[in-house]
Image (tube, grey):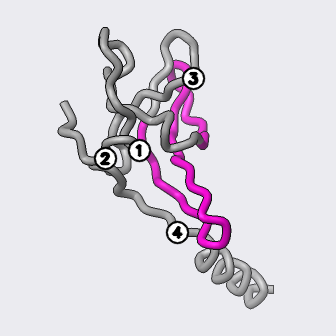
Amino acid sequence: MARTRRTTEDARDKKYERLTEWAGLRAGDPVDVDGVAGRGLSFSFLAHVRNRETDEAWVEVVGGRNGKRDVRSFRPEQIYQKGALKKAKHQPSLAEQPGLPLF
């Protein structure tokens, strides 16, 4: 049984590329997510994941309402520096302009 589990994990590792650093972010850095409305929402970057077979990509974040620690996935275009969505003029997402200086 352990052999089957390891084989499945190996296949998963080959199919997905998972980076804990992406576009100037490191795991645990606070981010804003566009298209998610609600009071008291806070998210932290977890990982950027790419499916090597289909070239699809998404960003995993952890958080939600006050005190929640749910893991959720969003398109890279929805991920912004913390506070960027509250500014008057549009700030580019981290997918559009990676490596922006974080404030």
Residue at point 35%, 31% (across, down): 92
Q: Earlier in the sequence, mark 3 or mark 2?
A: 3
The CA distance from mark 1 to mark 3 is 15 Å
The residue where tag 3 is placed is 35
Q: Is residue 53 above or below residue 49?
A: below
- What's the amino acid at mark 1? Ala
Mark 1 burial class by Cα count in 10 Å: few <14, some 14-19, many 20+? some
Q: From which residue to which does the magenta span run?
A: 44-73
Residue at point 49%, 44% (across, down): 76
Mark 3 burial class by Cα count in 10 Å: few <14, some 14-19, many 20+? few
Residue 78 point in image, percent of width and height: 50, 34
Residue 17 got which mark? Answer: 4
Specify whether 77 is left or right of 97.
Answer: right
Which one is nearer the viewer's eye here, 66 or 20? 20
Residue 95 got which mark? Answer: 1
Asked whether residue 54 is drawn in magenta, I would say yes
